[in-house]
Image (spheres, rainbow, N blue to C red):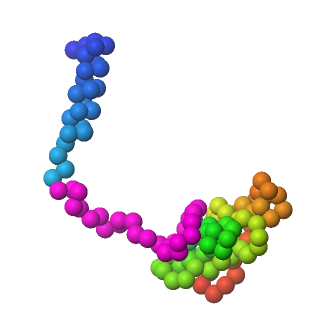
């Protein structure tokens, strides 16, 4: 059976209406096991999270010290540690595939930002 132009529009509208009107049967009370929870609790802004390749650490940017710096925190919880500490902004950290270093953007020498690499050498690092 061929569907004409007008009938195809009606079919699309009818499909959208049926999809949007499906009853949820209590799904609004459903609590999923992987529901997001708060990872950081500092009142400052935080952004650009990056999980380490082994899943044990999170790098992120925060302006809690007055400018944007890179921090690291165990994914299991605990204290955040600042990895960059100067008057310029550093942000957008991303792990190297081996988990031994990361790249980030720094405005220390260029107001538009340069990409830098930092190695991680501390107890418990990847």
- Looking at the image, which is closer to me, 95 or 113? 113
The answer to whether residue 32 is magenta is yes
Q: Is any atom of residue 103 visible in this view?
A: no
Give the residue at x 49% y 75%: 41
Please tell me whether the stretch drawn in magenta is mainly helix, strand or loop. Answer: loop
15 lies left or right of 54: left
How many discs mark residues in the rendered view?
0
Residue 84: image location, x then y, percent: 71, 74
Give the residue at x 57% y 66%: 45
Residue 115: image location, x then y, percent: 75, 60
Give the residue at x 25% y 13%: 2
Residue 48 location, quadrant: bottom right
116 lies left or right of 70: right
Residue 90: image location, x then y, percent: 71, 65
Q: Is residue 114 above or below residue 73?
A: above
Q: Is residue 71 above or below residue 104?
A: below
The answer to whether residue 70 is magenta is no
Residue 107: image location, x then y, percent: 77, 61
- Looking at the image, which is closer to me, 42 or 18? 42
Quadrant that contains the C terminus: bottom right
Region rendered in magenta: 26-55
Residue 10 location, quadrant: top left
Q: Is any atom of residue 10 visible in this view?
A: yes
Q: Residue furthest right?
A: 109
Give the residue at x 58% y 79%: 80
């Amino acid at each position: 059976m061929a569907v004409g132009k007008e009938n195809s529009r009606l079919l699309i509208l009818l499909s959208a209406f049926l999809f949007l009107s499906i009853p949820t049967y209590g799904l609004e009370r459903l609590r999923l096991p992987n529901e997001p929870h708060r990872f950081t609790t500092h009142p400052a802004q935080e952004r650009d999270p990056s999980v380490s390749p082994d899943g044990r650490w999170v790098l992120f940017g925060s302006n809690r010290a007055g400018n944007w710096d890179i921090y690291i925190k165990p994914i299991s919880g605990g204290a955040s540690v600042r990895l960059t500490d100067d008057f310029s902004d550093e942000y957008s950290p991303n792990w190297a595939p081996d988990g031994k270093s990361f790249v980030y953007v720094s405005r220390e020498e260029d107001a538009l930002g340069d990409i830098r690499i930092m190695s991680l050498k501390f107890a418990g690092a990847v």
